[in-house]
């Protein structure tokens, strides 16, 4: 094995052994970090491509495929692994890491390999990776030729959608980027819908890529109201969360005003019915909650201002409702 022409089969075997090197014959291998497993999947994929008989025609292409560099950020430490063109490039990366992640420790576990096809492109991609990882709570980046994979978890309170957009916008030209970034985990996972005369406000936590389906559902359900979306992407929702949130909106639509909240596996409804006839309908909807969710209610029946009062004349001076969801 010579510098600049690392055999991928050997590399994937070494990477696989990384998590088990400390295990004895009588012990089970320690569980690997999620980002280490992700890196192994990529390397196996690259290795399988090479076994398919697609031999590169150009020596530079072959070197490009073999040149792999990685950065891992975890628990306040940035670790550099894989190939580095020179000691001066290593020092540049150390400086970028210190500037983008102040206070983080830098661990160098790389190896010198001067066979990088394009040093300038490599350095631009690696500094880009360090800048992006600085925005994450934890994560990893792997550069292979002109392709880079960035995985990780956002910091609490960060705007997930904005971060994803910046990550792509800031990528150097010619760099193929794949992002597997996830929102941060939150517990409890709380989502809230507040119904007012004329508007519906959606707030709290929502899983990634489920905000638009939920907004569309709310807009179809409350067609005459303005739906305001201030939801924040996060992870940690219980199973069948979206279905439970939609049922909560169904029940909320029976109220004149009120709040529906889903906190982990508990659905809470508070407010005042739009008419006494809605009590029976509420019972029907409440039975549609997914298994594992429980319902808590504090809903009042409306008191009409006059015998001929219409629904829109409902008074908020309401009496207690008798419901048994």
Image (spheres, rainbow, N blue to C red):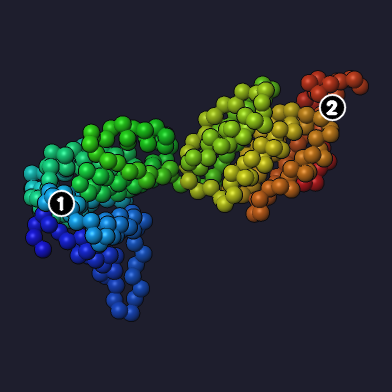
Residue that numbered label 1 is attached to: 57
Q: Residues within 10 Å of mark 2 (few under 14, many from 20)?
A: many
Residue 168 horizontal side relative to residue 253, left or right: left
Residue placed most toward the observer, 295 or 171:
171
Taking the spot 34% from the left edge, 62% from the top edge, the residue there is: 32
Instruction: From the top left corner, tell me how far across and down residue 241 is, in percent.
Output: 58, 46
Q: Position of residue 55 (x, y in %)?
A: 19, 56
Can you see residue 134?
no
Residue found at the far right of this picture:
307
Q: Is residue 227 above or below residue 100?
A: above
What residue is at 63 percent from the left and 45 percent from the top? 244
Q: Residue drawn 77% across and 46% down? A: 325
Judging from the image, what secondary structure is the residue with disc 1 in?
A: loop
Using the rendered view, name the quadrant where residue 119 is placed.
top left
Q: Which residue is mark 2?
A: 303
Task: Please tell me in which quadrant of the rendered image residue 110 appears.
Answer: bottom left
Q: Residues within 10 Å of mark 1 (few under 14, many from 20)?
A: few
Q: Which corner quadrant holds the N terminus?
A: bottom left
């Amino acid at each position: 094995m010579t510098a600049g022409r690392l055999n991928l089969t050997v590399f994937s075997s070494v990477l696989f052994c990384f998590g088990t090197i400390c295990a004895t014959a009588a012990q089970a291998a320690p569980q690997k970090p999620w980002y280490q497993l992700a890196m192994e999947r990529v390397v196996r994929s690259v290795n399988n491509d090479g076994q398919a008989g697609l031999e590169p025609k150009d020596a530079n292409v072959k070197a490009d495929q073999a040149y792999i560099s990685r950065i891992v950020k975890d628990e306040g430490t940035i670790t550099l692994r894989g190939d580095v063109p020179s000691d001066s490039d290593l020092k540049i990366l150390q400086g970028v890491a210190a500037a983008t992640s102040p206070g983080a420790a830098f661990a160098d576990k790389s190896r010198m390999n001067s066979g990088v096809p394009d040093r300038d492109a490599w350095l631009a991609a690696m500094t880009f990776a360090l800048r992006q990882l600085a925005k994450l709570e934890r994560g990893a980046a792997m550069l292979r030729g002109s392709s880079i994979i960035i995985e990780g978890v956002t910091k609490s309170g960060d705007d997930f959608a904005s971060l994803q957009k910046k990550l792509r916008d800031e990528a150097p030209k010619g760099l193929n980027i794949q992002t597997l970034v996830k929102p941060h985990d939150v517990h409890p996972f709380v989502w809230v819908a507040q119904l007012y005369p004329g508007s519906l406000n959606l707030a709290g936590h929502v899983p990634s890529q489920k905000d638009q389906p939920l907004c569309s559902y709310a807009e179809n359900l409350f067609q005459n109201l303005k739906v305001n979306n201030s939801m924040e992407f996060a992870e940690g929702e219980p199973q069948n969360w979206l279905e439970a949130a939609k049922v909560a909106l169904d029940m909320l639509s029976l109220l004149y005003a009120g709040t529906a909240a889903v906190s982990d596996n508990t659905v809470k409804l508070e407010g005042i019915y739009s008419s006494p006839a809605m009590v029976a309908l509420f019972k029907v909807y409440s039975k549609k909650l997914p298994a594992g969710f429980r319902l808590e209610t504090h809903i009042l029946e409306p008191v009409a201002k006059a015998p001929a009062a219409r629904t829109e004349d409902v008074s908020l001076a309401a009496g207690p409702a008798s419901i048994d969801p």
